[in-house]
Amino acid sequence: MATKQQPPIVPEVPNDEIDLRELFLAIWDKKWMVVGVTIIFIGIASFYTSLKPTTYQSSIVLSPPSEATILEINKEGIFKETKDSIFRRFLEKFTAPEFQVAVFKDKGYLNQLTQDFQGDFDENLVAYGFLKDFKLVDEVKKKKGQEDKFFDPNRLEFELLGTDKNLIQNFLNDLKSAANQKEVEVLDEIFNSRVNNELTQINQQIKDLLEIHQMKIESQKITLKEELEIARELGIEENNFKKMQSNQSNSLNLSIGDNQILPKWYLYGANALSKELDILNNRKVDSSISQEIIKLEVRKSRLNSLVPNFKNLQLIVIDKLPNIGQPAKSKKLLIIAIAGVLGVMVGLILIPILNILRKEKEIS
C-alpha cells in the first residue's frame, strides 16, 4: 500500500510590508490628534512672535566724491587723488566692524542700550549684537523716470535693522560723519607728511647747491692764490695786454707748449689777480646758482603758506539720508507656517508610534 506524501511545511514568514490602507485608517482615526498637535505648535509660534519686538529698517545711499571735490583736493599739486581712491578708503572705514563699534561707543549708543541692564555685561557683545544686521544692499535700483546722467552706478546702499527706529537712523548718520571725518584726518596727515618731505628735499637741494658752489669758489681761490704768488715772485704787477697790442707788428715768440694759453699771472698781473681774489672772497653765490636757489625758495615759501582746508569738506555724496526706521518685512507668517508644518509632521509621526505601543500592550 502506497504511503501518502505530506506536503512540505513552509515556515511562516513575518509580513513586514506596510498596509497603506491600515495606515490611512489609523491616521484618519487619529486625525483630531494631528489637528490638536498642529494647533499647539501654531499657538506656541504665535505666542513667540507676539512677544518679539517689531524690527525696523533704516538705509543710507552713498556716492563717490564729486569732480569739484577732487579738484579742490588736488589743486595744490600735493595730491593725485581720484574719486575711487577717496571712496575706497571711506568704505574701508565705514564698513569695518572695529570702526563701527568705536563709533557705537563714542557716540553714546552703548549707554542708551544698556541703561536698564543689571550687573556686568560684555560691551563688545552688545555692540556686535546691535551691528549684526548692518549690510550692503545688493543693488541700488534706478528710480522710475530717473535720467541716466543723474544715476551713478557706483553708488551704494547700506541698511541697518533694529528695534529702535530712531536709534538706527541716528547711528547711520553718525557712522557716515565719523568715517568722513576720519578720511579728512587721513588727508591732513598725508598733506602734512608730503609737504614736510618736499620741504626737506628743497632744503637739501639748496644745501647741496651751496656746498657745490662753495667748493667751486674754494678751488678758484686756490688757483688764484697760486697765480698771484707766481706774479709777485716774477714782479709782474700790471697786466700785459697793452704790451701784446703794441708788439703786434713785431714778432713775439713765447714758448708755452702746444695747445696751451698764456698763464693768467702773465696776462693779468698781481694787481688784477688780487682784485679778483677779493671779489671771490666777498661773493656769496653765482647768478646761475642764485636763480636756482630763488626758484627753490619760492616753492618753499609757497609750501609753508599752504594750510590744509579739508575740515569742512564733505567727501562723500549722500544720495539718500537715513530715514526714520520703517517696519522691516515681518517673518511672523513664515514662522507660523513652519510651525504648522512641523505640527502636522509630529502628529503623523506619533500615530504609528502610538499604534505600536497599543499593540504591544494588547499582546502583553
Image (cartoon, grey):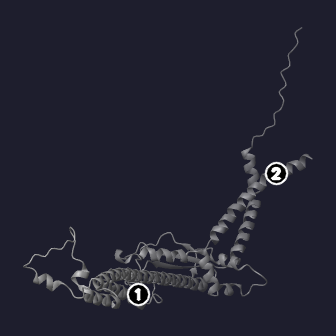
Q: Is residue 145 left or right of residue 315?
A: left
Residue annotated with mark 1: 303
In this rendering, the answer to whether 276 lies above or below 39 is below
Q: Quadrant of the N terminus?
A: top right
**Furthest residue to the right?**
364
As rendered, which of 24 and 132 lies closer to the eye? Answer: 132
Disc 1 marks a residue whose amino acid type is: Leu
Disc number for residue 355: 2
Q: Position of residue 172 (x, y in %)?
A: 55, 82
Which quarter of the figure has residue 41? bottom right
User: The residue under label 2 is which amino acid type?
Assistant: Asn
Q: What residue sits 16% from the left and 84% below the top?
A: 241
Q: Look at the numbered disc 1 and give the secondary structure of its residue.
A: helix
- The residue located at (82%, 51%) in the rendering is 355
Inter-mark Cα distance, 1 to 2: 93 Å
Q: Estimate how packed mark 2 is, as few (under 14), some (14 to 19) or many (20 or more) residues with alpha carbons within 10 Å.
A: few
Please state the horizontal and vertical placement of residue 24, each as a whole percent of the image: 72, 50
Q: Looking at this view, is 180 or 273 the one in front?
A: 273
Image disc number at residue 7: none
